[in-house]
């Protein structure tokens, strides 16, 4: 089974800090995604990557950046954390072919104080 | 723009009941549809993936159907158990690499 691992389950950071959320997948998937999930707003796509060093903006990229230096790792960066970035962050991956499904990680609950 | 709607938003049933969760989407041009389960504070677990050419998929007590032309999918859970309590999310893959999610159905199975 594909495994998507997010490095932290819970994270508490201060306003203005630079925050790194790490995600690693072990099945050589081309595509990787970062979502945030908030009550009443559902899942919203922040960024995705379809290849190493490639990235595309999702629906809500403002205040975030990403890095994909290796195929298995996709990092989400909050350049200067703000309280409105308190959320559940979910990483996912999928193979390049369009008939494959997505596999999600267990999520990181980030609180910015 | 593709939109996904899940009905009902919440459902509470006694243990042992068979139940149906509904998902509808506005644009029938999809590659596949995926049902997920999410426990509180956790990530999404994939339950079933149905390709656009398929009509249904089964896994244990779960059966998902797809009627692409009418823009509908159902998730059937047989003999529900308290451990089935969770949020169930439906997502379609319309093009490229992005999924479009429904808001989910919160299921509670009472013992």
Image (tube, rainbow, N blue to C red):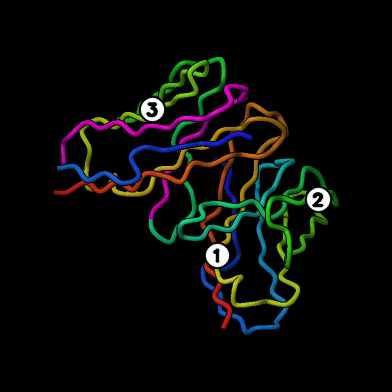
According to the picture, the residue beneath numbered tag 1 turns out to be A108
**Label 1 SS:** strand
Residue B30 in the magenta stretch? The answer is: yes
The location of residue B49, given as percent across then percent down, is: 51, 29
Q: Which mark is residue A55?
A: 2
Residue A85 in the magenta stretch? The answer is: no
Answer left or right for A53 relative to A95. Answer: right
Q: Residues within 10 Å of mark 3 (few under 14, many from 20)?
A: many
Confirm whether circles 3 and 2 share one chain: no
Answer left or right for B48 relative to A12. Answer: left
Image point 35% across, 45% down: which residue? B9
Magenta stretch bounds: B15-39
Q: Nearer the viewer, mark 3 or mark 2?
A: 3
Image point 61% across, 70% down: which residue? A85
Q: Which mark is residue B74?
A: 3
Image point 41% across, 22% down: which residue? B65
Q: Which image quadrant: the N terminus of chain A?
A: top right
State the CA–CA distance, disc 1 to disc 2.
Answer: 21 Å
**Label 3 SS:** strand
Image quadrant where residue B13 sits:
top left
Q: Residues within 10 Å of mark 2 (few under 14, many from 20)?
A: some
Q: Which mark is residue A95?
A: none
Answer left or right for A36 relative to B87. Answer: right
């Amino acid at each position: 089974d594909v495994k998507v691992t997010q490095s932290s389950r819970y994270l508490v950071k201060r306003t203005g800090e630079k925050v790194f959320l790490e995600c690693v997948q072990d099945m050589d998937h081309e595509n990787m995604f970062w979502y945030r999930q908030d009550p009443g707003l559902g899942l919203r796509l922040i960024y995705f990557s379809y290849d190493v060093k490639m990235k595309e903006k999702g629906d809500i990229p403002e205040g975030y950046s990403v890095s994909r230096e290796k195929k298995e790792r996709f990092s989400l960066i909050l350049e200067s954390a703000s309280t409105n970035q308190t959320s559940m962050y979910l990483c996912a991956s999928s193979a390049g072919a369009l008939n494959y499904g997505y596999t999600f990680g267990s999520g990181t609950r980030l609180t910015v104080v | 723009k593709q939109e996904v709607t899940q009905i009902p938003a919440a459902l509470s049933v006694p243990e042992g009941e068979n139940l149906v969760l509904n998902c509808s989407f506005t644009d029938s041009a999809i590659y596949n549809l995926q049902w997920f389960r999410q426990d509180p504070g956790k990530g999404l677990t994939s339950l079933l993936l149905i390709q656009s050419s398929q009509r249904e998929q089964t896994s244990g007590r779960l059966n998902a159907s797809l009627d692409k032309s009418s823009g509908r999918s159902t998730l059937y859970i047989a003999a529900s158990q308290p451990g089935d309590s969770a949020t169930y999310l439906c997502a379609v893959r319309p093009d490229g690499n992005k999924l479009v999610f429904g808001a989910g159905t919160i299921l509670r199975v009472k013992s």
